[in-house]
Amino acid sequence: MSEIRNVAVIGAGTMGHGIAYAACLAGYPVALTDADVGTLARGESRIRAAFDKAVERGKCTPTERETGLNRLSCLSTPAEAVIEADLVIEAIPEQLELKQRLFASIEGAVTPETIFASNTSSLSISAIACVLTHRGRLLGLHFFNPVPVMRLVEIVRGAETADAVVGAAQRFAVSLGKTPIVVKDSPGFASSRLGVVLGLEAMRMFEQGVASAEDIDRAMELGYNHPVGPLKLTDIVGLDVRLAIADHLHATMGGDTYRAPELLRRMVADGKLGKKSGQGFYRWEND
């Protein structure tokens, strides 16, 4: 297994452009693509803004900003983006069939040594890999939002993921300044399985009028030293994303632990998706 030199990121939304920025900042040439031209343009704009902010905060020089931006290529199709990639990271919607179709469609455009990684937060890596000829090449590479700030990367080993692929992914995560953990392919992995429980219970408490959103969050921030409370975190992640994960975990694990509160369903139906829509459990000022 050769070392990772070039990276392709498929999906330029919140997670995708964050991953692309982190990789560019760490010195990797990155090819970024998205099926939606508008999303790709916004992703590129936000990467530029992230570099501008890094200069303002003294995290990089203006010269390093230009060098980092020169590492970024925005391309119109996945087939173009993956040609030179040693690592392909998908950050597209949490739909199993969509991820399967994507990886199956690009496998013929890369070498057998190219690593495939899914940024899924809950879907089975083995199920995604089952459509591939070289199943050992795929693993989970679960980043956290906001990618430039959050230090954890959850590496998910599928049933057939090769040891060399896991090792290369660990080294890549460390090169981005992240701390990797390795977990087996199980529902929700480690982070979502724990985090979703807390988030859903916080929603039930809010729905029952136990406390305000602010005070529920303060209970965890000040009482348990969480940097962000569960309801604010849900807003940052996206209520629609949280609902999709909860429904998946409920379907795979059963019981009531992961049953989504009706409040969450109503808010998603009303378009209150959190930070990205400007309204969730909090009001947000968006660019």
Image (cartoon, rainbow, N blue to C red):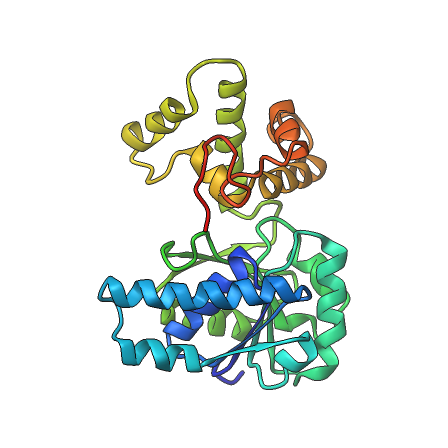
On screen, residue 227 above or below 160: above
* Nearer-the-camera pick, 9 or 69: 69
Q: Quadrant of residue 77?
A: bottom right
* Residue 170 visible (yes or no): no
Q: Quadrant of the N terminus?
A: bottom right
How many badges with numbers are in the image? 0
* Horizontal and vertical percent position of residue 101: 77, 65
Where residue 279 appears, as percent x and y from the top left, is 52, 35
The residue at the point 68 percent across, 41 percent down is 248
Q: Classify residue 230 as left or right of residue 138.
A: left
Residue 26: x and y in percent read 37, 74
x then y, percent, for residue 239:
57, 38
**Residue 42 visible in rendering:** yes
Vertically, is 154 above or below 44?
above
Q: Which residue is at the front of the view, 58 or 285?
A: 285
Query: Which sits in the foreground, 137 or 81?
Result: 81
Toward which corner of the image does residue 128 lie, by quadrant? bottom right
At 60% from the left edge and 54% from the top edge, which residue is drawn?
185
From this view, report whether residue 263 is shown above or below residue 125: above
Residue located at (49% from left, 20% from top): 206
**Residue at x 30% of width, y 65% of height:** 54
Asked if residue 62 lies left or right of residue 203, the reply is: left
Outermost residue on the top side: it is 209
Residue found farthest to the left: 58
In the foreground, 55 or 231:
55
Please say if 70 is above or below 181: below
Image-quadrant location for residue 8: bottom right
